[in-house]
Image (cartoon, rainbow, N blue to C red):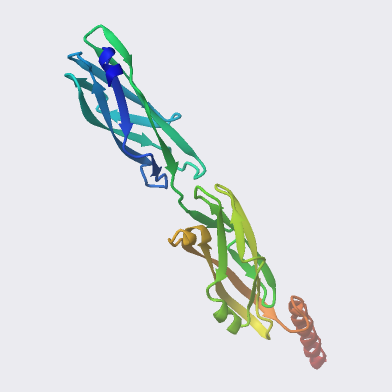
Amino acid sequence: DEAEAQNPVPIVVVKLDQASQEANVAPGQSGVVTFTGSCEVRSLGVERVAVSLSAAAGGWATAVSPSSMVFQGNGEQSFTLSIRAPPFTSFSVSQTVEVTGTWVGAGVMSGKVQPANARVDVKQYFKMSIECSKPYIQVNPGDSVPFEIKVWNEGNTKDTFKFDILNLKDLTQAGFSVQLSRNKVEVEEKGYGRITITVNTPKNWEIWENEINVVQIQIESEGAQGMGTKLVDTYPVYTWEHGMYIPGFGVAGGLLTMVLALLGAVVLRRRRF
């Protein structure tokens, strides 16, 4: 304080009340965080000091309110600092925000404000989408058909997705068998993973079959689960059994039918003679 008494130049200092905050950049969220702070002026005999504040955060949008303050001698005033993180920013990104400024005293003296810093982190969010290029396939009874399923990680951090067949019990009782190439897939943010689901239709005597069956696939985010939230989706794929199946002949059952039809025609012709 003795040094201050010998120095007539005002001292202007800004402080932020929080050291860090998290920005929510998930779809539908603003990505805005707000800090509170204060600007203190020790005018040391100068009657009037005008202060202008600004902020920078590595290219992210910032706003200080109020950005201009006037002090009549010593005093302290509060302000707010808002930072907007861009939508969908990666969880791995953080940004330092710095509040700086200038001051003018007594119309002739001027100087820089002692700055303040804080950190803005990005909050994790989890999102996914599922697709299948051929979710509806026509098959013969007794056939095996693969469905390739893609899961897109639309969150902002790496995630692991679990796959399950919701109606497996019903399908098994109906004579189907369903196999997953794997039941989990780890996917980087903004990337995709794939699995193959193989459906084997029943191998029973079928003179003629014309039936649509659905396989209900469930996909769940382990990342969301680990954060105490739930991200689950279902995706249906369909088989249309159309045709016949005779054990021992497989898809050649149709040929057997043709042979039987020809034999019947020969017998009928013989009877005419």
| Residue 102 or residue 193, whichever sits in front | 102
Decide if residue 187 is on the left or right side of residue 55: right
Up/down of 161 relative to 245, above or below: above
**Residue 87 showing in the rendered view:** no
| Residue 181 or residue 73, whichever sits in front | 73
Quarter of the view holding residue 99: top left
At x 67%, y 66%, the residue is 181
Q: Residue furthest front?
A: 2
Q: Residue 132: where, in percent of width, then height?
A: 58, 58
Decide if residue 266 is on the left or right side of residue 99: right
| Residue 216 or residue 93, whichever sits in front | 93
Up/down of 33 relative to 100, above or below: below
The C terminus, quarter of image:
bottom right
Up/down of 188 relative to 85, above or below: below
At x 61%, y 59%, the residue is 185
Decide if residue 98 is on the left or right side of residue 206: left
Quarter of the view holding residue 50: top left
**Residue 220 showing in the rendered view:** yes
Q: Residue 34: where, in percent of width, then height?
A: 32, 38
At x 53%, y 64%, the residue is 219
| Residue 69 or residue 148, whichever sits in front | 69
The N terminus, quarter of image:
top left
Up/down of 125 relative to 7, above or below: below
